[in-house]
Image (tube, rainbow, N blue to C red):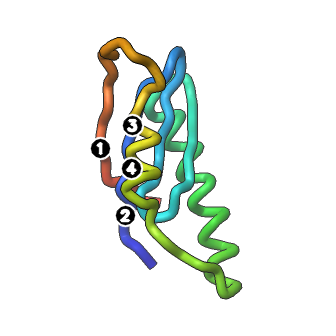
Amino acid sequence: MIDFYTVVLRKSADYWVALCLENGLVGQGKYQEEAINKLKEAIQSWQEIANNKDVYKSPISVQELHEFLTIETQKPVDEVFELRAVYA
């Protein structure tokens, strides 16, 4: 079991999205902490399933991370990103 998860937070429109790099799970909320709490809930549910069954576990790929960080626009975008260790 992992002690902590690596999470990238991204502001998107009026909400925050938290992406876990170790398993690809996401959470979103109006505030950073709400997004992280939703992600923690998803991780805990995932851990219950993963611990009881033979579930394939894989970190997200660089391509998936790039897609998460990239905005589909031709204009430069000023975005806020944050990297955190989250204990779940």
Q: Secondary structure at mark 3?
A: helix
Mark 1: which amino acid?
Answer: Leu
Q: Secondary structure at mark 1?
A: strand
Q: Identify the mark at residue 55; answer none if there is no mark.
A: none
Mark pair 1, 3: CA separation: 12 Å
Point out residue 18 in the picture as x, y percentages from the top left corner: 47, 41
Mark 3 or mark 2: which comes first in sequence? 2
The quadrant the N terminus occupies is bottom left
The residue located at (57%, 30%) in the rendering is: 29
Point out residue 80 in the picture as x, y percentages from the top left corner: 32, 24
| Mark 4 lies on residue | 7
| Mark 3 lies on residue | 69
Foreground mark, 1 or 3, reads 3
Foreground mark, 3 or 4, reads 3
Mark pair 3, 4: CA separation: 12 Å
On the picture, is 1 further left or further right than 3?
right
Q: Identify the mark at residue 83; answer none if there is no mark.
A: 1
Asked if the residue at tag 1 contacts the one at tag 4, i.e. Cβ–Cβ closer than 8 Å, the answer is: yes
For mark 1, does the 10 Å Cα neighbourhood hold few (<14), some (14 to 19), or many (20 or more) residues? few
The part of the image, by quadrant, that contains residue 48 is bottom right
Mark pair 3, 2: CA separation: 22 Å
Q: Secondary structure at mark 4?
A: strand
Mark 4 or mark 1: which comes first in sequence? 4
Q: Does 39 sit above or below residue 77? A: below
